[in-house]
Amino acid sequence: MITAEENDLLCLVEGNTAMGGIMRNHWLPACMSEEVFEKDGKPARVRLLGEDLVVFRDTKGRLGAIDEFCRHRGASLAFGRNEDCGLRCLYHGWKFDVNGNVMDMPSEPNAGEALKAEAKIKSYPTQESGGFVWLWMGDTDNIAEFEPPAWAHCPDDKIAIVKIHTSCNWAQVLEGSIDSAHSSSLHSTNMPPAEVNSAKATATSWPRPSRDKAPRIRLEKTDFGFHYAAVRTPIIDPEIYDYIRATLFVAPFSVIIPPNDQYRLAQMLVPMDDGNTMFYWIAFHETKGISRDDWRKFCGAEIGIDIDKNFRKIRKLDNDFLQDREAMKSGDFTGIYGIPAQDMAMWESMGALADRTKDYLGVSDGAVAQFRRVMITAARDYLDGKPAIATRAAGRAVALGDLASYEGMILRDSDWKQGLPYRAKARKAA
């Protein structure tokens, strides 16, 4: 349980909030590269930290991220003409380049030459990596070096991304991603126990080697946030082995999830504003992997079927996520199709901003409690003038690209961290 003041400190990201400041000291995913793949193509609407932007790729392939609303009279540039290395507003023809500079003002005498310098529109630096366009929304005099994410080293066709708008605050979404206990109940139909030696992936399910619904949580703070293990009793040789699922929380908004035998997994839970989150789920592998279409079908996130062109869900709270009670009677645990929709039914049912003052946490909520401790402390440190958590300035030594989770069997009561591939590079935070 935390106080109302701590709940706001943890959750609120708009304006001059501490958590918003922390976010602005990290490169943020704005959209998928596929959304702005075409030169001179349709701009993508983006909402981050309470700001509305458009991202576009110009004639030369350069990416721009600028204020959605024209500097002139505030019409949306999402309708604009993307042409000749700039985005032109339909209303009066004002045109802006990828850096926000005014290129043309045809409605003004002499094409607005006297006004161009003063009429520059807000813009943000961009990078492209791992299937995403990334923005720097912080101090432009102190831009952190961009570091590719953990999946960026994989071939493009081995990276598959699901994107879904989630109608609640980012922190309750992230808490769901690091809550290992819920998968044994909420996702039990999709993740059935099986007599296997590690997590598997089929076209329709993820069989797991344990029936244990009460994992023991082991935690360690790190310079990137923290990592933890959910320790379960396996089905095979339970007197000899523990089944370990080790997860990484990479502050402030990412989770590296334990893999299966076909692909690795990561999530980014990106704050759009105080009450909305963009949920990204990435499946990736160096050689194996899953196709983009198959990944979206597995997750129940196919565009035009499960979500609309703006990544908003067809199954949502006001239609009870199309829950099928007859399917529940026939053995489906939730009656809700797709792992993300199952999660979102729980997250969104808490309200747009969950009231954590009423929580009653159990032993299995260790990672959730740790997240709250770490990020509330980080917010207070930021307000005291300290560097944002998990930045190089704050002492992070391990590279983001080296981070990886793991799952598997180890001898009972052995060190759960033995399978972490980056362990030699990770430092405990002071």
Image (cartoon, helix red, strand yellow):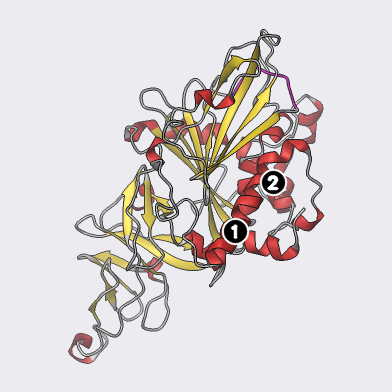
Q: Tell me if residue 15 comes above or below residue 37 in the rendering.
A: below
Residue 200: which disc? none
Q: Residues within 10 Å of mark 1 (few under 14, many from 20)?
A: many
Q: Position of residue 66 (x, y in %)?
A: 36, 68
127 shown above or below 95:
above
Report helix, strand or loop for mark 1: strand
Q: Is residue 358 left or right of residue 146?
A: right
- Residue drawn at point x = 58 percent, y = 12 percent: 197
Q: Quadrant of residue 105?
A: bottom left
Depth check: 376 or 206 in front? 376
Q: Are marks 2 and 1 in contact (CB under 8 Å)?
A: no
Can you give x and y, in whole percent of width and height, for residue 418 in the image?
A: 52, 23
Say which of 148 and 124 sits in front. Answer: 148
Q: Is residue 285 above or below residue 303?
A: above
User: In the image, what residue type sits under mark 1?
Assistant: Asn
| Distance from the alpha carbon under mark 2 to that under mark 1 | 22 Å
Disc 1 marks which residue? 276
Instruction: Name the residue nearer the viewer: 54 or 123.
Output: 123
Residues in magenta, as a range: 205-213
Residue found 74% across the figure and 53% down from its top: 350
- In the visual, does 422 lie left or right of 49? left
Q: Which residue is mark 2?
A: 369
Residue at the image position 36 percent from the left and 60 percent from the top = 55
> Is-magenta flag for residue 207?
yes
Farthest residue in the front direction?
Answer: 430
Please say whether residue 181 is visible from this viewpoint. Answer: yes
Looking at the image, residue 121 lies above or below residue 55: below
